[in-house]
Image (cartoon, rainbow, N blue to C red):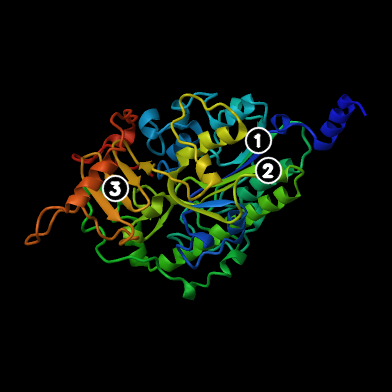
Amino acid sequence: MLKRDILVLLACCLGPPAAAAAKPNVLFIAIDDLNHWVTHLGRNPQARTPNIDRLAAMGVSFERAYCAVPACEPSRCALMSGRRPWTSGCYRNGDAWKKFQAPGEGLSAQFLKAGYHVAGAGKIYHRMACHESEWSEYMSREGKSSNGPGVRNDDGYHDDKVHPNLKDEDIIDWHSADYIIERLGRESEKPFFLACGLFKPHLAFVAPRKYYEAFPLESIELPPHIEDDLADIPPAGVRMAGPGKDHAKFLQSGRWKAAIQSYLATCAYTDMNVGRLLDALEKSPQKDNTIVVLWTDHGWSLGEKEHWRKFALWEEPTRTPFIWVVPGMTTAGGRCKRTVDLMSIYPTLCELTGIPVPGHVEGTSIVPLLKDPAARWDRPAITTHGRGNHAVRTETHRYIRYADGSEELYDHAADPYEWKNLLAPRSPGEEGGAEPRTGKLRRQLAAWLPKKEAPAPKRKSDRRRPGAPRSSPAK
C-alpha cells in the first residue's frame, strides 16, 4: 500500500482534524428573580429544585456568584452588553437600556456575526425587548401572559389569592421553553445560540396549585433574621432597603410565611421548565457539543435585614445560582467557591466558542475556573445599584460604599447573614478605633471601586424630597 493511501485511510478513520471540528452550540438559560434558594447550594433546606440540581450535577456550580446590578433592566443590560453600569450609565430600572447599548454590541450579536443561528424567547433583556438585528428570530409575546389570566402582581405576595385553575401553559414560560425545545430538536448545518428567558419566580408569586404541595404552610420556616438589623446601617443603606414598605406590611398582615411558600412554589414551577429544557437537550442531536449556562439576573430578599425584593447591596439580593456545563472541559458535579460576578458570561462564552471579544467588554473570562474550580483567583465580585453605590464581595468579606461615602463591612466567615457592620459608628462608652486589620482590608476592597462613573440619567422620579440622594433605587 502506498504511503498516500495509508494517510487517506487514517484520515477516514480518524475524521476531520480538531481545528475543523464543529463549533460548540450554546443553550443560554436566564431566570428572573431566582435567589440562591436552590437545593444544591444548601442556603435554604426548604427549596426543591431537582432539575436545576440535575444541571449542577452535569457541570460546575459556582457557590459565590453575584449580579452586576440588583435590578432587572440594568443587570441584563450589563451582562448582555459587557459594560459595567458605571461605564454605560444604565443604573436602574426605567433607565431604558437601548439608549446605552447600540445594536451590534450585544452578546447575541457576536454569535450572529460568527455564523450561528441565534434564537431567543422570553425575558433576556428587560421584559421581552431586544435589538431585532442581533437575533435570527425571537419569539413573539402576543397573546401570552407572564403571570397568567387574571393574576395581579401582588397575588401570592401581599394578597391572599391562589388562582386554583391556573395551568402550566397559562404562563409565558411554558411557551418560551416550547420555543427553544423545538429548536433544540432541529437538524441544522449552522451551530446554534438558543436563549431561553424564564420570567418566574418574578412577581406575581403564583403558580399552578400542584407546585404548592411540597411546601405546606405549616412547615414554612422564616429565614434567619434578628430584630433591629438596620440599627448599624448608615442612612443611605436604610433608605435603599425601604424598611417601612414591604416588611412593615408583612409584619402587620402576618403573610410572611405565606409569601415564602408562594415564592418556593413559583421557583418549583421554574425548575419544571428547566427540566423540560434539559430533557430536550438530552434528546438533541447536538447534546454532546452544547455549552449550557444558567444564570439569574439577581437575588431576592424575603425579610432578611428587614428587606424584601432586590434593590439593595447585601448578600440575599445580589447572590445568584450560576451553572456551566462545557463538554470536554467541566467535571460533572464540580463546585467552585471562588467569587465571580455575571460580567464574566460575555467573555467566557466568546473564549469557549472562539469568537473575538469586542473591545468594549469589561468582564473577565472564568475559563480557568471551568477547567479547575479550585484554581487561583484573585478577583472579587462587584455589584452596583445607582450611581456611586457599590458592593465588593470576596470569598470572606463584603464591603459596601454608598454615594455619600458611608460604608458597611461584613466578615462572612463569622457572620454569614451580615448582622454586624464592622464599620458602624461606635456606641457611646464603647472603645473607639477600628482594628488595624479592618482598616487595611477596607482600603484593599475599596481599591476595586471605579474612579470615574457615568452620570445617572435624569428622570421625573429624581424630583425627591430635600436631602434624598439621586442614587435611591427605582422599583
Mark 3 packing: few (<14 Cα in 10 Å), some, or many (20+)?
A: many
Kind of residue at disc 2: Ile
Q: Tags 3 and 2 in contact by the CB under 8 Å rule?
A: no
Query: In screen coordinates, is 251 left or right of 10?
Result: left
Which of 370/81 is in front? 370
Q: How many marks?
A: 3
Circle 1: element type: strand
In the picture of the structure, the residue carrying the numbered disc 3 is: 399
Residue 326 lies, with reference to residue 135, above or below; the image says below
Q: Nearer the viewer, mark 3 or mark 1?
A: 3
Q: Earlier in the sequence, mark 3 or mark 1?
A: 1
Tell me the tag on residue 259: none
Distance in Å between CA atoms under marks 3 and 2: 40 Å
In the picture of the structure, the residue carrying the numbered disc 1 is: 119
In the picture of the structure, the residue carrying the numbered disc 2 is: 180
Q: Earlier in the sequence, mark 3 or mark 2?
A: 2
Distance in Å between CA atoms under marks 3 and 1: 39 Å
Query: In screen coordinates, is 327 left or right of 451?
Result: right
Horizontal and vertical percent position of residue 423: 20, 52
